[in-house]
Amino acid sequence: MTWWGHSTVWLADSGITLLTDPVLTDRVAHLRRLAGPTPTLPGAPDAVLLSHLHADHFHLASLRLLAGAPTLIVPRGARAFVAKTLGSEWASRCVELAPGEDTKVGPLRVRAVPAAHDGARGPWSRDRALAVGFVVEGAARTWYAGDTGLFDGMTEIGPLDLALIPVGGWGPTLGSHHHLDAADGAEALRRVKSGWAVPIHYGTLWPIGMTRFRTHMFDQPGGRFAELAARSSPGTRVRVLAQGETLAVERG
């Protein structure tokens, strides 16, 4: 896996490549990339996993930058939004999943799992779909949580080989409601039981004009998550990656 910042992760398993919630530009609306390089993908992914409609996860400009014609695995209800914004050819490549449903990408099985998060595009839009996470089952069993808070039934997601856990946000006013901070992320890891864990969704995007405000919320969540996870999940190997850094995970 390679973490490209925020929630963008390149996953390679069993000869198949997946990309999660791609943000491939240096700006998303009022947010600017303040850490890590602009992503340079090694090629066209076989499929893109899109967890919900928020613009920092379902970024239309970044989707248009993708090479090839990857399958889009989207939450139930999102195909209509894809057809409206990207066109019918894109919509024809969508596979909609609700929690508990799955699809195959080559030898990989991709299953949607619950996420405690608002699925609306935003206050300016009437577009809405579910918010989900994904479990990818191949040589390893990987959970990409998307955006979520803690929820009942999270223990049913595990056990895992790799957990990609969001531990921060993109601004000083973004609280932990329907998001995981470092402490809640450590609790999520304790619940799902994973051999490896990598903190994501922090330290990349920040509101323009606010670079001097509460910067600890920008750069500290990953390290704090690792400290807390060492106490609550001592059997898990936690790796705090820099943007653009790669980790190879072996099952077991």
Image (cartoon, rainbow, N blue to C red):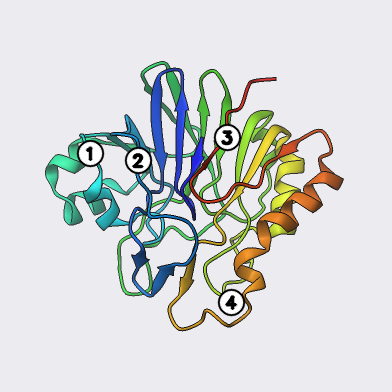
Which residue occupies 57% across, 59% down?
202
Circle 4 sits on which residue?
Answer: 172
Q: Which mark is residue 41?
A: 2
The amino acid at mark 2 is Leu
Disc 1 to disc 4, C-alpha distance: 34 Å
Of labels 1 and 4, earlier in sequence is 1
Q: Are marks 2 and 1 in contact (CB under 8 Å)?
A: yes
Which residue occupies 40% across, 60% down?
56
Which residue occupies 22% across, 39% down?
67
Of labels 2 and 1, earlier in sequence is 2
Q: Which mark is residue 247?
A: 3
The amino acid at mark 1 is Ala
Disc 3 to disc 4, C-alpha distance: 29 Å
Circle 1 sits on which residue?
Answer: 67
Q: Residue furthest left?
A: 88
What secondary structure is marked by label 2?
loop
Near-viewer residue (164 or 149): 164
Nearer the observer: mark 2 or 1; the answer is 2
Nearer the observer: mark 2 or 4; the answer is 2
What secondary structure is marked by label 4?
loop
Label 3, residues with CA under 10 Å away: few <14, some 14-19, many ≥20: few
Near-viewer residue (192 or 219): 219
Q: Is residue 228 above or below residue 18?
A: below
Of labels 3 and 4, earlier in sequence is 4
- Image coordinates of residue 203 in percent, x first then y, are 56, 62
Disc 2 to disc 1, C-alpha distance: 9 Å
